[in-house]
């Protein structure tokens, strides 16, 4: 899970084996995680983040 960027408490990373899905990025903070498609950028799913946090990350 290579980290590609950090902003504040958020870590942006990808899984090298995620080849069967559109290009996307994972974001985590503590025990929370979310996934965003990148082309175009849009929220895909979350476990733990609320709507305000998702909006801020996006």
Image (cartoon, grey):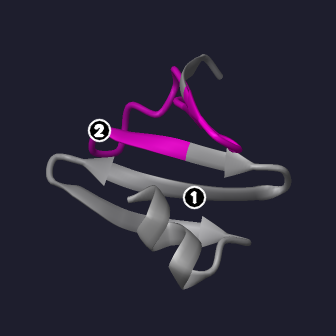
41 sits to left or right of 21: left
Give the residue at x 53% y 82%. 51
Q: Among all residues in the image, which is located at the extreme right?
A: 31
Residue 56 in picture, x, y percent from top left: 46, 64
Find residue 55 and name its label: none
Quarter-wise, where is residue 33 in the image? Answer: bottom right
Q: Which residues are magenta?
A: 6-26
**Front in this rendered view, residue 19 or 4:** 4
Residue located beneath label 1 in the image: 34
37 sits to left or right of 13: left
Give the mark nearest the N terminus, 2 or 1.
2
Q: From the viewer's perspective, is the residue at label 2 or at label 1 nearer?
A: 1
Give the residue at x 38% y 59%. 58
Residue located beneath label 2 in the image: 23
Q: Among all residues in the image, which is located at the extreme bottom?
A: 51
Q: Is residue 15 magenta?
A: yes
């Amino acid at each position: 899970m290579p980290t590609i960027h950090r902003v504040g408490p958020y870590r942006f990373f990808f899984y090298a084996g995620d080849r069967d899905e559109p290009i996307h990025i994972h974001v985590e903070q503590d025990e929370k995680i979310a996934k965003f498609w990148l082309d175009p950028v849009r929220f895909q799913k979350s476990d733990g983040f609320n709507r305000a946090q998702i909006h801020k990350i996006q």
